[in-house]
Image: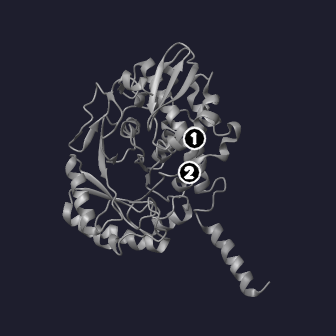
Amino acid sequence: MTANRRRFISTALSGAVASPALDAAPGSPVGERYRKLDEILKQPVLRKQFFRAPVIIETLELLRFEGSYLCRVRSRDGAEGISVAHSGMSTLFPIFLRNLQPFFLGKDARELDLILEKVYVFGFNFRYNGIALGLPLATIEFAILDMLGRMANKPVGQLIGEIHSPNVGVYMATEWREKPVEESLRLIQGAVAEYDVHALKIKIGGLMFMTTDMYAAGPPERTEKIVPLVRKTFGDELAIYADSNGFYSVPEAIRVGKLLEENKFAYFEEPVMFDHIEEIKQVADALKIPIANGEQDNSFYGFRWLIANDGIEVVQPDNYYFGGLIRSMKVARMAAAFGKTIVPHMSGGGLGFLYNIQFVSAVPNAGAHHEFKSFKTNVRFECKTSPLKVAVGKIQVPTGPGFGADFDPDWVRKH
């Protein structure tokens, strides 16, 4: 072994020992944080006290009509709940039918926490994991929570926590990263003008998906132009967030992050790839702007590491992708324990906005604004306890049983 190599190994090892992000030994500061987070993960979420007798799941159906999917669950005693599936169900329905449906039948819905834990190992489900498992699992969980809420005559928010936010602040989520700056700005202005929102999120970096061009990166220097232009256009009163969907390397993310800081952006979402957790921390350590991450995360491990090591300030599980509200609530509790903010990502059309605001209503550490795209949906339903409008930047959370959505029976029968 050469002297240089010996010196390199010695330096590397001593650096690892000295690094608080890597020292997770019992009794160390990070080790104690892990211990606290692990205790939080063990705590159940569903408030079983509302249900004295077993609620046995008798049937669990996936219903389809054209491009729409519904999940319908019924208990042995005749209670019923319905959820609207994410659009990705058109690809993932075999996992629903073969991997998840058999596991839920005959189970007591009051044990939903335990069911969600065990389903990840049932039939080698851990080999699927990620969004492939989380999305259909969340669809099932939403239907079960809707059923339980109707049985208890409680909104879903009260089944998973106390109500902290009866009205949820929202931000307008915009896209158009592939457009020239001037066109992007016009589209963003139109989206903001459509609703009474007080916050906005823009996309920065290059386009990484939804294109067949392998070399597509968006218009050159678009980010450098649009960041100050958006701030100048909307002024200091509007809260503005930026999302790069993991586009940057660490040095580029730091460079862009400083541009966001100069223009008073409120946080920087997914500066590098979502699962490059050590790189996320490198970016966070180099910047003052809060770093957000988590929409694509599919395990507790990544959230646990980033929270324990102060790699993020804004924690963003997606209620569909991550496998439902109960799993997301565990992440919210971990975040709250260390002063982090929860701003869940909202994916899919259908009733994604409704599931999102029910979740947000029940977390004590919710951010000021939460993702919103529009109320436009092909779902035929009525909400009796909320107008479901944006007023003064907020949406009133339904207080009716379950998710507060009563579906048109004729529309459901078409499925």
Dividing the picture into quarters, in which one does residue 152 lie? top left
Q: Amino acid at mark 1?
A: Leu
Q: Secondary structure at mark 1?
A: helix
Residue highlighted by disc 2: 304
Which residue matches tag 1?
Answer: 41
Residue in front for this viewpoint, 287 or 234: 234
Quadrant of the image occupied by residue 1 = bottom right
| Element carrying mark 2 | helix
| Residue at the (59%, 41%) spot, across then down | 39
From the top left corner, tell me how far across and down residue 92 is, in percent: 55, 42
Q: Position of residue 327 (x, y in %)?
A: 53, 39
Relative horizontal placement of residue 368, taking residue 37 as reference (left or right) = left
Q: Earlier in the sequence, mark 1 or mark 2?
A: 1
What is the x, y in percent for residue 61? 54, 27
Where residue 233 is drawn, which disc sits there? none
**Residues tagged 1 and 2 counted as in contact (Cβ below 8 A):** yes
Q: How many C-alpha atoms fall within 10 Å of the one at disc 2: few (<14), some, or many (≥20)? A: some
Residue 338 placement, left or right of 7 = left
Residue closer to the observer: 388 or 305: 388
Gap between marks 1 and 2, in whole Å?
10 Å
What residue do we see at 58% from left, 36% from top? 96
Q: Is 249 located above or below residue 69 in the figure?
A: below
Which residue is found at the position 38% from the left and 21% from the top?
409
Q: Is residue 248 above or below residue 238?
A: below
For this orientation, the residue located farthest to the bottom is 3
Q: Is residue 71 left or right of residue 121?
A: left
